[in-house]
Image (cartoon, rainbow, N blue to C red):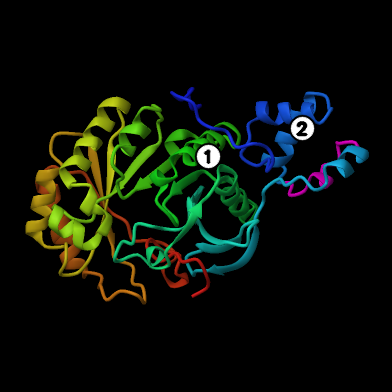
Amino acid sequence: MSISQTPGPLKTPLLPPLLGASVDELTTWVQQQGQPGYRGKQLHNWIYHQGVRKIGDISVFPKTWREQVADVSIGRSSVDYQSLATDGTVKYLLQLADGEIIETVGIPSDNRLTVCVSTQVGCPMACDFCATGKGGFKRNLNRGEIVDQVLTVQENFQQRVSHVVFMGMGEPLLNTENVILALKCLNQDLGIGQRSLTVSTVGIPDRIRQLAQHHLQVTLAVSLHAPNQTLREQIIPSAKTYPIEQLLAECREYVQITGRRVTFEYILLAGVNDLPEQALELSQQLRGFQNHVNLIPYNPIQEADYQRPNRDRINAFVNVLQKQKIAVSIRYSRGLEADAACGQLRRGKK
């Protein structure tokens, strides 16, 4: 499925860097360099399907032109460090053109390869249980820097990426413009189906509604983590500016506009938000629209004292939701011992 034309103008970054650009944009650029238009398709193929890192390595281009544009950046990062978990998950520290470091994670499973991409250098949301937010925020990533992460994992695994989750460093809906452009690129240029793309958010006022207006078929995952406003503010400081009632109202509107159900991510913290009565309160909040609860047992970090609940507490929470007819699943994060699991990503080596 291809992403349809999005409403309203999206500012397209000036070329170069070239990564993230569509075939039409690349065609315009090569023509501006005095080259025939068909070289745009050639450039597109070499960037997205051959994985070229330098224009000088594109052998089908005339040598004289390659020399003229040798300094033009395609926009690829370099792998600064990587670690392998016993389950096959690989965490990468990628160095960007300005020297900043981001993390991305490759998660292999039967017949699929998922990439967890970052959308910002650091994160401004400062969620109490998350290592990324402890390191502060530097800047947004551009569309090419997001797409580059997928190409890097694809090259390293020598396997086509089938799924991409925007659940790495950063808050995607604070970088909506570049996230939309990256989604278009992943769909149209790399051929990853819309329904295999997931955008995660803590919730930014009006941004879920804004995302809905693009009528994408991607999955929206909302990090809820609490059944009420008081507890949510303790866990997620930014929630103070966005009451849970307003957040859920936007989620209902999202379902109405897109026809897609919303996934609610809920990290289970022992003795904090994992009680049966909290499960009941959560089910009452989620009645009346299509949704699914994804329970994530807490992944420990050095900077916080939270604990993961035991299986009995997890199962009791699940049982309450199921009795209330709430769709629910448990996700035990991959890559735990490599610090590559949900909430463990940092801008540097451990």
Q: Nearer the viewer, residue 155 or 132?
A: 132
Q: Which residue is mark 1?
A: 182
Q: Main secondary structure of the magenta part?
A: loop
Q: Nearer the viewer, mark 1 or mark 2?
A: 1
Residue 109 seen anywhere in this rendered image of the structure: no
Q: Nearer the viewer, residue 221 or 25?
A: 25
Question: Residue 238: x and y, percent?
Answer: 27, 55
Question: Residue 176: x and y, percent?
Answer: 43, 40
- 41 over 223 or under it: above or below: above
Question: Residue 203: x and y, percent?
Answer: 29, 46
Residue 70 seen anywhere in this rendered image of the structure: yes
Asked if the magenta segment contains residue 58, the reply would be: yes
In-image side of 94 versus 310 (left or right)? right
Check the image and name the residue furthest to the right.
64
Q: Secondary structure at mark 1?
A: helix
Q: Which residue is mark 2?
A: 42
Asked if the magenta segment contains residue 277, the reply would be: no
In-image side of 220 versus 231 (left or right)? right
The span from disc 1 to disc 2 (Cα, nearest Å) is 21 Å
Region in magenta = 52-62
Mark sitting earlier along the chain (1/2): 2
Question: Residue 100: x and y, percent?
Answer: 58, 61
Label 1 neighbourhood size at 10 Å, few (<14), some (14-19), many (20+)? many
User: Which residue type carries mark 1?
Assistant: Ala
Corner quadrant of residue 31: top right
Q: Nearer the viewer, residue 263 or 350?
A: 350
Residue at 50% across / 54% down in the picture?
Answer: 139
